[in-house]
Structures are given as structure tokens and as C-alpha cells.
Image (spheres, helix red, strand yellow):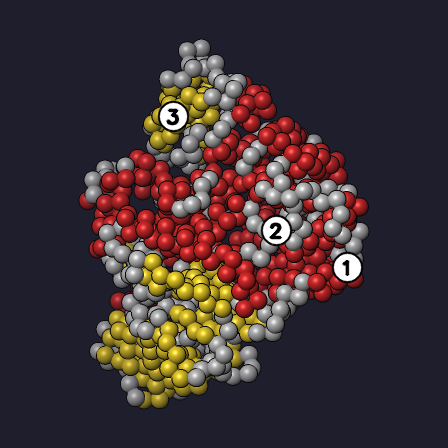
């Protein structure tokens, strides 16, 4: 099925004005399909157009009382001709439940056999479960009704009311884009509350009931705190009635900002211990989706090239509001360590793009731009803009934008226009430099005889202005901070040149590659643990990680810095992020796994012995130790309940971590996985077991076949299997599959759709096979235009990482 192009969308938006939708869902069937009827009222300025629907069977189409030939359906589009000034279209279709997390997802909970459904409409997914004019700038109000089993409940964008046994009606919504429409239907457990006149609710599977009940007050508190702050910041209150947060199974990303009924991946209902970093991340996801109620839902982009206006704004607000108004701290440290690091890598990849690209891509290609640039870089740019303009001007412009375009659509030009009216100067030049170009500047520090000089180098003709702070740190870690406007390629800074460590952008206020001078690098092992600010430590580590990836710093020196400082690191965000970096890039990537794994495990073992019992730091350190140690007997004893560090609970998820590591150490096998699954008869257990079975030496072929050919496997189980497949300690076992990736992966674009395609490729690409001979097959796959864009894009990212690793090994041996 061909994807919608921007030219087609603009033409249809000019031709049609959608008045309303009435959508009826019948979910009472026993098979893998359901029936939907859409009654669409719309005005037309042209005599022809089309409606989008992707059914198993199209039952009936009626336009202005006349039945049309259902055989006219072509590639998900049904042509409409003879349109009048005002029209009524009724389309009834039988559609297939999805297993890939888009459309109307149907999942069976392994814990009790209950069935759950939810709608995911993002980008091209809406026509998979209701006929519609599927593009973001054709908004309309919706009235939805649902027939379902009598023991189900129904939620959606409008308040849901049962009108008869197994029949529900949802209140008419405000005008919505198609990609915000959702229903959540099943035997969900519901928890209700209220704040400031807004009905609040939480929903989850029955098997997660006790865990949601335990966390409900935390979730509601974050929601209340964020609403209060958004109501303070914005001149318009939350506009969409009830506010439900539904934690749903087999969700392919973190959350989706459906007005009135936000859907979340239900792994965010913690059934096991969670670190403060993980709870803080969950809070930010909640706050992120709430920001969308204004930026994205109330005012929506016209086309997908301006998705950054949604995602960057929500990402920025998530960290800002979480830090300023919620009970969770460390948000900007997390942004630097996790989100910004993601974006920095994306912006240096071959698939980089401007934050606000030209509107050239179709809807399917645009899906690939939901990445570290549209989220993290855009958020960093907005943070820089707010610092540059000041809050008064920034928020005045934002509020004017929201008021001017409420319940409608707007683009970058219109956003800049409102900021300018609010008092911002020269934003056309700013947007050209920051939003319309890709890549990032490099900021380096030089000690001179008289002081300190900052240098800015750019990858192109852009000369971006950076407003930042530079920090000088003495041997005790004490800081001297100087504000700098870096508006030239070389700027002198009033900072002493005798600081032990000098850190450009110490507060992480801009978007650039940061390079430390040789003296600072030499002093880092002693000084880094003494720098109190976690965000500054993240800036330093991002510089170290980036310099290592660019083959400018010996990875052994980077590892030595980790070993020298990890004992003193008190941030669970930092420990978790750095261990993941070692797993993903260093051990088995830049450095030989067998030679360099043991020192990491020893360092984490020593840290584990000294962390406070029951603390987040203990938990994240234990997780890192488990994935790096080769002490199978110790891990087995923990699994058996013996010798466990005081305060560390070996709960369900930590047990699965132990089983996975022991499988990789050839200390457990298939029967042990089955026994663990018998202990944990949950959907989560099924997914964990899939990860462990993919790690079995004799389980590789079965896992590979499922990943590459089975369209019925659920999203979480699929991704778990892919995550379990590769490991540097099994390089010889997985070697036959390395080149098979390039021949087999294309078929997954034929059996799955949407975001899960890219997510699968990212996990199953042979990222730890550091072999220059793979460059050719990767280039050939990327160049094959018959392969879906998501696969080619993720293969390009794999190739970027491969080339870097090859260069690091070539440079440092």
C-alpha cells in the first residue's frame, strides 16, 4: 500500500472540511477480526477524493445514500466521486486485530487468559481499525460507540458511559486528528481520582492490579503536580475533559498522547523493584504526554515534518516541569546522560536530518524521524532558546501560538511568528541555524598563557550562537562558573587557566560536541568524583563517550576512567547509563570482551559491597554486576536465595536477569528456563523466557525464525527475543547469523508495519560483529529501495556504528 505524500495531503485538506465522525466498533466476534462502521460528515470543494481504510473485507460503502462498489478499494484507498458541497459517507469494514502494536491491538494475558484491546492510530495506523481521512490537518469531533463482551470496560477520548450490557457510548470529543483517536476495551482494572475539577483515572490488566494499586498515589501525585504547573504556565486549562492514563499490553513505545486517554506501555507498572531513576523516568513520561495536551493535541502540526513542534516541546517540558514541579529530581542529569546522548549519536549518523526538515517525506518515511533529533535535539534547542529569550518572552509566544491555533493546525513559520510578536529578535536566522540544518558544532577549550579560550567549529556554513556556562574545577571539585555567549569561532573567557578541569557547557545548556583539553583529561580520574553536580558529570561523560566513538580517545583510557570513578558515583542514572554504554559499545565492540569484562565486573562487585542496602544505587549496581560477572556459582546461589547482599531483593525481574546471565554462561539450559516460567506464569514471564531462549546456544535458530517470519508474535516477546540473541560471549555461536541478517531482515517489512519494524531491526542487527567485510552487504541493503524505509534507516545506523568501531580498533589496536 502506497504511503500518503505531503502533496496529496495538502490537496485533500484544500478539498475537504470534515464536520464529524460517528464510529461504531463491534468487538463481540470470536475470531481475529472485528467490525467497524464510520459515518463521516464532510464538506467538499472538489467533486472527488478518497477515504482511507485497510480491511480484511470491505462490507459496504454508502455516499449520500447511494451504495458504491466495494471492489473499488485500491491499496487502502477507496475513491469518492460525485461529491457535493455537503456529504455523508458510511463505511462498514471487517478489520484484523493487530499484533504489532498499531491499529486495534489484541493481546491475551498469559497470567489468566483475559483478552485486552487498545487502539493505536499513529501515522498510518488509524485506517487499520476505522475508515477515515487519515492525515493530521483534517481534524473533526468524534462520537464513538462500542459493543463488546459484558465483562469489559471501555475508555476513549471522550468520557465513556455504559448504555446497555456490553454497549458503551463515548462523549463527543473536541476536534481531533485521526492519529489521536483511541479506544481501550477489555476487562481492565480501573482506579479513579479527581484534581482541580478534572476526573482522573488509571487502568491496567487485572494481573497487574496489585502493582497499580501500590503505585496509584505516586502516579496521581505526578499528574496533579504537572497539571498545576501547566495551568500556571499556559493561559488555557486542560481542554479535553476526563484524563485517563491506561497502561496497556504489547505497546511498542513508551506512551501515546491520545487526548483524554493516554496509553502507556504497561511495563511502567512496576511489578518488581524499580530504581529512583526508573520512577523518575516514568514521571517524565507522564509529564511529557501531558504537555502534548497543549502542544500537539490542542495545536497540531500540519504535516509530519513539524512533528518536532510536538515532540521537542513535550520533551523539553517533561524535564523542565518534572524538575520544577514534581517530587522527582535529577531530571536534567537524566536528560544529559540518556536522552541527549541518544540525540548526539543520531545527529552524527548518516541518517541525520534537521530538527524541522522540509516537508519532502511521505507519512511512512516520516515515521523514521521519530528519533533522537526530533525528541532530544529539539528539546535541547528549545532549552537553549528559552535561555536566550528569557521565560517572559518564550512563554508569551508559546501561549499566543496556542491561542491563535487552538483545535487547529500550525507550522514552524507560525510558531516563529508568535515568538517574534512576543519580543524575540532575529528568529528567522536562529531557526535557519538551529532548526533547518543538521549536525552539530564542536566546542573545544584551550589554555593560553593569559587565560582560557573557547573555540567553535562547525560542520557546515552555519555559525550557531551558543549561550552557555564554562566551569573551572579545582582539585577538590569546587567550581567557578562563567557565563559565555559563543557568537564567534574564538572567544576569550575570564576564567583562570590553572583549573584542574575545565568543562565547556558545564550546565548542559547547548547542543554541541564538547572536547576537553589534555590537562583536564589527565586530571579527571582524581577530580571527576569530586564534582558535585550530576549534570556536569554527565557533560564530561558525554564528551568521553563521544571522543571514544570518534577514535580520538583510546577506549582503554575511557574504561580506566570508569574503573577509577565508578566507586564514587552516587547517581543511579549515571551508573545505569555507563554500564549500558559499556555493554552496547565498549565490551565486545571497541575492546575485546574476554579481556576487559572482568575488571568491570570487579569494579561493580566492589561498589555493590559498599552501597546502602535496599537503595536504588545498590539495585542498579547489582544489575550491572550480574551482566558482567562470570561467577556462575555466585549467581546460582543468589537464585537459590543464598549469599544475597543485605537489602537486595531477588524478585521476579532480577531472577530473570540471573537466569539470562547463567544461560549465557552455559550454566543453565532450556529446562531451567521452563522451570522459571512455571514460577512466573505471567505475560512478563513469557517475554523474559523468550529472551532467555534466544540466548541458548541451541535456541538461536528457533529464535531467528520467529523474529524473521512470525507475524503473530507480540511486540514485547518479539523484541525480547531479539535482545537475547546477540552477545559478545557467544560470538562463535552467532557467527553464522551475521550475514543472514542482510538477506533475511527485509522480509520483516512484509509481515509487520509501523514502529515495530525499526525497533526489531535495531535489536537484531549484529552490532557486536566488528568486521569491515560487513560494510558492503550493509550498503547494498541500504541502497535497495524495495526494502521498507524503516529497515534501511536502522541498517544505516548499524553501519555508522560499525564504521566507528572498525576505526576505533584500527586506531588503537
Counting residues from the start of the chain, the first of labels 2 and 3 encountered is 3
Res 615 quadrant in image: top right
Distance from the alpha carbon under mark 1 to that under mark 3: 61 Å
Q: Is residue 170 above or below residue 360?
A: below
At x 45% / y 22%, what residue is drawn?
A: 479
Q: Give the residue displayed 24% in from the left and 75% down from the top.
A: 43
Q: Pick the residue in front: 612 or 99.
A: 612
At x 68% / y 45%, what residue is drawn? 627
Secondary structure beneath dot 3 equals: loop
Cα distance, mark 2 to mark 3?
A: 37 Å
Real-space Cα separation, disc 2 to disc 1, in angstroms: 37 Å
Circles 2 and 3 in contact, beta carbons < 8 Å: no
Tell me the tag on residue 778.
Answer: 2
Residue topped by disc 1: 672
Tag 2 and tag 1, C-beta contact below 8 Å: no
Instruction: Give the SS element for disc 1.
Output: helix
Q: Nearer the viewer, mark 2 or mark 3?
A: 3
Nearer to us: label 2 or label 1 = 1
| Of the pair 666 and 530, the residue shown nearer to us | 530
Marked residue nearer the N-terminal end (1 or 3): 3
Q: Horizontal placement of 577 versus 3: left or right?
A: right
- Quarter of the image for the C terminus: give it: top right
| Local SS, label 2 | helix
Would residue 358 appear left or right of 421 to someone viewing this image? right
Image spot of residue 560 (x, y percent): 65, 29
Marking on residue 108: none
Q: Which residue is mark 3?
A: 489
Amino acid at each position: 500500500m502506497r504511503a500518503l505524500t505531503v502533496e496529496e495531503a495538502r490537496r485533500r485538506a484544500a478539498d475537504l472540511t470534515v464536520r464529524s465522525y460517528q464510529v461504531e466498533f463491534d468487538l463481540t466476534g470470536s475470531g481475529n477480526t472485528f467490525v467497524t462502521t464510520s459515518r463521516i460528515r464532510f464538506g467538499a470543494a472538489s467533486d472527488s477524493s478518497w477515504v482511507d481504510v485497510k480491511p480484511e473485507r470491505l462490507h459496504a460503502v454508502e455516499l449520500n445514500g447511494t451504495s458504491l462498489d466495494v471492489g473499488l478499494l485500491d491499496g487502502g484507498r477507496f475513491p469518492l466521486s460525485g461529491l457535493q458541497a455537503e456529504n455523508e459517507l458510511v463505511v462498514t469494514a471487517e478489520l484484523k486485530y493487530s499484533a504489532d502494536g498499531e491499529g486495534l491491538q489484541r493481546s491475551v494475558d498469559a497470567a489468566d487468559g483475559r483478552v485486552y484491546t487498545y487502539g493505536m492510530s499513529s501515522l498510518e495506523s488509524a485506517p487499520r481499525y476505522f475508515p477515515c481521512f487519515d492525515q493530521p490537518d483534517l481534524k473533526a469531533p468524534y462520537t464513538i460507540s462500542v459493543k463488546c463482551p459484558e465483562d469489559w470496560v471501555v475508555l476513549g477520548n471522550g468520557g465513556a458511559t455504559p448504555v446497555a450490557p456490553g454497549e458503551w457510548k463515548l462523549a463527543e470529543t473536541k476536534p481531533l486528528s485521526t492519529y489521536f483517536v483511541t479506544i481501550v476495551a477489555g476487562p481492565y482494572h480501573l482506579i479513579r481520582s479527581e484534581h482541580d475539577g478534572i476526573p482522573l483515572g488509571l487502568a491496567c490488566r487485572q494481573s497487574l492490579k496489585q502493582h497499580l494499586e501500590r503505585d496509584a498515589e505516586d502516579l496521581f501525585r505526578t499528574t496533579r503536580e504537572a497539571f498545576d504547573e501547566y495551568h500556571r504556565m499556559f493561559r488555557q486549562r486542560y481542554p479535553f475533559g476526563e484524563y485517563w492514563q491506561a497502561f496497556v499490553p504489547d505497546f511498542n513505545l513508551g506512551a501515546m498522547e491520545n487526548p483524554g486517554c493516554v496509553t502507556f506501555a504497561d511495563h511502567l507498572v512496576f511489578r518488581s523493584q524499580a530504581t529512583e531513576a526508573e520512577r523518575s523516568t516514568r514521571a517524565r513520561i507522564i509529564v511529557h504526554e501531558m504537555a502534548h495536551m497543549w502542544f500537539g493535541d490542542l495545536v497540531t502540526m500540519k504535516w509530519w515534518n513539524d512533528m518536532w513542534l510536538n515532540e521537542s516541546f513535550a520533551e523539553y517540558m517533561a524535564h523542565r516541569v518534572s524538575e520544577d514541579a514534581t517530587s522527582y529530581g535529577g531530571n536534567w542529569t537524566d536528560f544529559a546522560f540518556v536522552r541527549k546522548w541518544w540525540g548526539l549519536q543520531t545527529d552524527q549518523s548518516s541518517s541525520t536530518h534537521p530538527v524541522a526538515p522540509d516537508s519532502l517525506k511521505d507519512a511512512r518515511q516520516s515515521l523514521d524521524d521519530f528519533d533522537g533529533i526530533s525528541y532530544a535535539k529539539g528539546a535541547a534547542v528549545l532549552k537553549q532558546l528559552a535561555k536566550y529569550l528569557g521565560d517572559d518572552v518564550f512563554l508569551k509566544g508559546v501561549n499566543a501560538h496556542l491561542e491563535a491555533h487552538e483545535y487547529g493546525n500550525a507550522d514552524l513559520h507560525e510558531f516563529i511568528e508568535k515568538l517574534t510578536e512576543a519580543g524575540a529578535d532575529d528568529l528567522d536566522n536562529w531557526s535557519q541555524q538551529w532548526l533547518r540544518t543538521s549536525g552539530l558544532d564542536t566546542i573545544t577549550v584551550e589554555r593560553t598563557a593569559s587565560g582560557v579560550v573557547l573555540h567553535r567549529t562547525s560542520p557546515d556554513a552555519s555559525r550557531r550562537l551558543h549561550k552557555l556556562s564554562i566551569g573551572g574545577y579545582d582539585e577538590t571539585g569546587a567550581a567557578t562558573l562563567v557565563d559565555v555567549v559563543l557568537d564567534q569561532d574564538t572567544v576569550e573567557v575570564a576564567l583562570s587557566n590553572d583549573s584542574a578541569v575545565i568543562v565547556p557547557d558545564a550546565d548542559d545548556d547547548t547542543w554541541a560536541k564538547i572536547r576537553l583539553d589534555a590537562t583536564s583529561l589527565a586530571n579527571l580520574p582524581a577530580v571527576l568524583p569530586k564534582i558535585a553536580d550530576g549534570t556536569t558529570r554527565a557533560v564530561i561523560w558525554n564528551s568521553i563517550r563521544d571522543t571514544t566513538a570518534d577514535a580520538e580517545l583510546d577506549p582503554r583510557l575511557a574504561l580506566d576512567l570508569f574503573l577509577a570513578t565508578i566507586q564514587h558515583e552516587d547517581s543511579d542514572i549515571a551508573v545505569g547509563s555507563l554500564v549500558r554504554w559499556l555493554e552496547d559499545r565498549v565490551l565486545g565492540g571497541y575492546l575485546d570482551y574476554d579481556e576487559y569484562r572482568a575488571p568491570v565486573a570487579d569494579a561493580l562487585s566492589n561498589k555493590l559491597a559498599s552501597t546502602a542496602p535496599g537503595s536504588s544505587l545498590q539495585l542498579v549496581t547489582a544489575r550491572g554486576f550480574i551482566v558482567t560477572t562470570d561467577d556462575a556459582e555466585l549467581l546460582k546461589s543468589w537464585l537459590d536465595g543464598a549469599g544475597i547482599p543485605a537489602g537486595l531483593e531477588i524478585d521476579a525481574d532480577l531472577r530473570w536477569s540471573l537466569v539470562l546471565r547463567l544461560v549465557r554462561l552455559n550454566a543453565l539450559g532450556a529446562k531451567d528456563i521452563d522451570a522459571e516460567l512455571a514460577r512466573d506464569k505471567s505475560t512478563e514471564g513469557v517475554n523474559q523466557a523468550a529472551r532467555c531462549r534466544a540466548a541458548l546456544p541451541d535456541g538461536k535458530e528457533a529464535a531467528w525464525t520467529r523474529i524473521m517470519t512470525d507475524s503473530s508474535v507480540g511486540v514485547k516477546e518479539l523484541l525480547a527475543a531479539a535482545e537475547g540473541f546477540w552477545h559478545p560471549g557467544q560470538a562463535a555461536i552467532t557467527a553464522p547469523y551475521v550475514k543472514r541478517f542482510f538477506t533475511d531482515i527485509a522480509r520483516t517489512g512484509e509481515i509487520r508495519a509501523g514502529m515495530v519494524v525499526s525497533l526489531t531491526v535495531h535489536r537484531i542487527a549484529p552490532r557486536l560483529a566488528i568486521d569491515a567485510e560487513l560494510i558492503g552487504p550493509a550498503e547494498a541493503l541500504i541502497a535497495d529501495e524495495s526494502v521498507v524505509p524503516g529497515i534501511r534507516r536502522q541498517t544505516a545506523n548499524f553501519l555508522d556504528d560499525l564504521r566507528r568501531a572498525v576505526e576505533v580498533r584500527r586506531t588503537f589496536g
